[in-house]
């Protein structure tokens, strides 16, 4: 029996496993083992809704054992500490190892907090369920301590920073102030001018201040220091958030294989490692490029598309079929900007406001990992207006 080990249960790893599970095999089905250090899959694009209280943890971060309950995929919650590519083994914490015939490395990325002094110690990243829970706890503690207003400094004006800024502004309202920093001179560099204009209007409506073209010098326990041109300036803040880019995890940094820009694993168009065709790499840690060689960036959309190709190529490699070269198809942009508003650009023409927010929710509902989880979430979302009406009706009697 062939053995496929998938390291990382994010969009890339989980959807590779789920897609591969649907394929038919002429002979004996391979064993599929999914390894992740967390017990939860995180639907990262909806993580912001945990901060605002719009969604619950079970909707955004279901447990792997629940998602995989009706599949043949085995899940192992463990910490991967290294790879023996020559020997075909994944090394685990505690000294154990898992052998493989095919390996998928999809361990995700991490927020580079070491690039500025003090950021690792004092700034909060926003990438995981634990990060969201830490932010909620920090906000609660600051408000209970009497912060009025609660000052939030948010570093990184990409999609994550913009979504988080708007969500916090709507959540805190008059109890907080938000300042969004970036060393670039424009927000959302990968978005079109029309999309950026709509997003800027949403930020302005929520009184989110922009400090663009700004270099962060250091982060402290009560704020951050910036380069103000003629000197430095201290910006006091109860909460400093760090959403600056995506770096590769240390696990990948120690891997002795060909690398691309940013230390990402170099891969062939088939998503295989250059020197190890039995090993596939995808998601945030792999250097995926378009036909011109330009890096495609790190996004859930890219990871989701790569998962489909990776699943096919795993099946093909075990059945002596030709492998497919990955081709990325940009499907547009989706941003949730605060509560009940957003920007959506799926057909080349951007929408904004409540309609865009609804489109975003429906697209993400469709992308939920399993039909069972999708149904549970859909029923819960559909019931919310009824429950609010019943609650209001009862209060009025």
Image (cartoon, grey):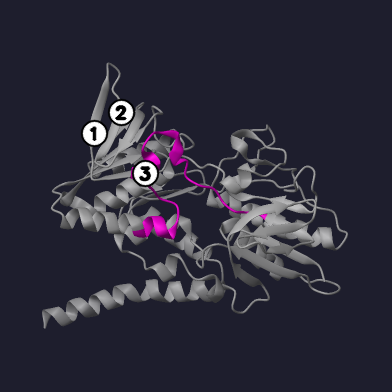
Residue at the disc numbered 3: 121
Q: Which residue is drawn at 65% across and 76% down?
A: 71
What whole-number distance in Å separates the C-alpha atoms at marks 1 and 2? 7 Å
Q: Where is residue 368 in the image (x, y as percent from the top left)?
A: 52, 65
What number is the disc on residue 235? 1
Residue at the disc numbered 2: 226
Q: Is residue 17 left or right of residue 119?
A: right
Q: Which of marks 1 and 2 is nearer the N terminus?
A: 2
What whole-number distance in Å separates the C-alpha atoms at marks 1 and 3? 17 Å
| Magenta stretch holds residue 122 | yes
Secondary structure found at label 2 = strand
Q: Position of residue 103 (x, y in %)?
A: 73, 57
Mark 3 or 2: the one toward you: 3
Label 2 crowd (10 A; few <14 / some 14-19 / many >=20): some
**Is 69 situated above or below 89?**
below
Q: Earlier in the sequence, mark 3 or mark 2?
A: 3
């Amino acid at each position: 029996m062939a053995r496929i080990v998938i390291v990382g249960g994010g969009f890339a790893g989980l959807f590779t496993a789920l897609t591969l599970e649907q394929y038919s095999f002429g002979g004996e089905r391979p064993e599929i083992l999914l390894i992740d250090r967390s017990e939860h899959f995180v639907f990262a694009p909806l993580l912001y809704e945990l901060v605002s209280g719009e969604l619950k943890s079970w909707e955004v971060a279901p447990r792997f054992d629940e998602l995989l309950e009706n599949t043949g995929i085995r899940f192992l919650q463990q910490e991967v500490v290294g790879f023996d590519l020559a020997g075909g083994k994944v090394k685990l914490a505690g000294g154990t190892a898992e052998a493989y015939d095919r390996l998928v490395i999809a361990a995700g990325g991490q927020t580079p907090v070491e690039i500025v002094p003090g950021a690792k110690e004092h700034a909060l990243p926003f990438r995981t369920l634990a990060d969201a829970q830490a932010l909620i706890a920090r906000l609660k503690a600051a408000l209970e301590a009497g912060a009025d207003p609660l000052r939030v400094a948010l570093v990184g004006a990409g999609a994550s920073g913009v979504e988080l800024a708007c969500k916090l502004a709507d959540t805190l309202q008059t109890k907080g102030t938000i300042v969004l920093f970036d060393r670039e001179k424009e927000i959302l560099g990968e978005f079109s001018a029309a999309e950026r204009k709509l997003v800027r209007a949403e930020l302005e409506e929520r009184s989110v201040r922009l400090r663009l073209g700004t270099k962060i010098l250091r982060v402290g326990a009560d704020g951050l220091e910036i380069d103000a041109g003629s000197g430095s300036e201290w910006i006091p803040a109860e909460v400093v958030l760090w959403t600056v880019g995506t770096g590769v995890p240390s696990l990948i940094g120690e891997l002795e294989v060909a690398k691309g820009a940013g230390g990402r694993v170099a891969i062939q168009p088939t998503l295989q490692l250059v020197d190890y065709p039995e090993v596939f790499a995808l998601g945030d840690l792999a250097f995926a490029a378009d036909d011109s060689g330009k890096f495609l960036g790190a996004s859930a959309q890219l990871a989701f598309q790569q998962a489909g190709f990776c699943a096919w190529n795993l099946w093909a490699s075990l059945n002596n079929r030709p492998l497919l070269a990955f081709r990325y198809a940009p499907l547009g942009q989706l941003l949730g900007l605060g509560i009940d508003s957003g920007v959506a650009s799926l057909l080349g023409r951007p929408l904004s406001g409540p309609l865009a927010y609804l489109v975003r929710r429906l697209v993400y509902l469709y992308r939920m990992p399993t039909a069972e989880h999708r149904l549970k979430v859909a029923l819960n979302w559909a019931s919310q207006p009824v429950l609010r009406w019943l609650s209001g009706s009862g209060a009025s009697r």
